[in-house]
Amino acid sequence: MRELPYELYRAAQVRELDRIAIEERGVPGYTLMSRAGEAAFHLLRQRWPDARRITVVCGGGNNGGDGYVVARLARQAGLPVKALTLADPAKLTGDAQTAWQDALAAETPIAPFTPMSLDDSELLVDAILGTGLEREVTGAWRDAIQTMNAYPADIFALDIPSG
């Protein structure tokens, strides 16, 4: 895999790059999601080579879809992994739904998020909110983010940190 770029982009810039790739270059959205998940998993293994018991917390949009890709790849690599959902997977649409289905097909353990479900996790992957967030985070989602932030493990955020 190529070396990842070190540039930082604003959320609006990332959304525009995605739009160009999909609309102008004809790259399918799920292809972009898969590439993002593969790059994230590669970086995860470089940064935390000894991490076992990985927990990926997935939101309901494409950032969650990226998380399902990472969880599937970890499962296929033989790592103990679980994906925890904050959104009802049955209500996922588009590429995020495809990523969830592929994770299920790979027999990736997927369960609803609860504070107790983080127990024994050595690394958390934040795939909750992505570049599209434009509101205050409240309710169960805020509680989950606070629980993750208080948990004694590193957090690897996909796209941008949720909190």
Image: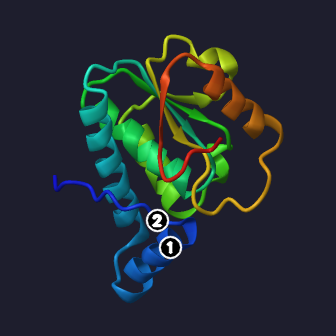
95 or 121, nearer to the observer: 121
- In three-dimensional space, the C-alpha distance between marks 2 and 1, rounded to whole angstroms, equals 6 Å
Q: Residue furthest top?
A: 120
Label 1 crowd (10 A; few <14 / some 14-19 / many >=20): few
Residue 60 in picture, x, y percent from top left: 63, 50
Residue at 47% across / 47% down in the picture? 158
128 or 78, nearer to the observer: 128
Residue at 28% across / 59% down in the picture? 5
Q: Is residue 158 visible?
A: yes
In this image, 49 relative to 152: left or right?
left
157 lies above or below 33: above
Three-letter code for the amino acid on which mark 2 is drawn: Tyr
Mark 2, secondary structure of its residue:
loop
Label 2 close to label 1 by CB (< 8 Å):
yes
Q: Which mark is residue 121?
A: none
Give the residue at mark 1. Answer: 13
Label 2 crowd (10 A; few <14 / some 14-19 / many >=20): few
Give the residue at mark 2. Answer: 9
Residue 38 in picture, x, y percent from top left: 30, 49
Q: Residue furthest right?
A: 139
In this image, 29 relative to 129: left or right?
left
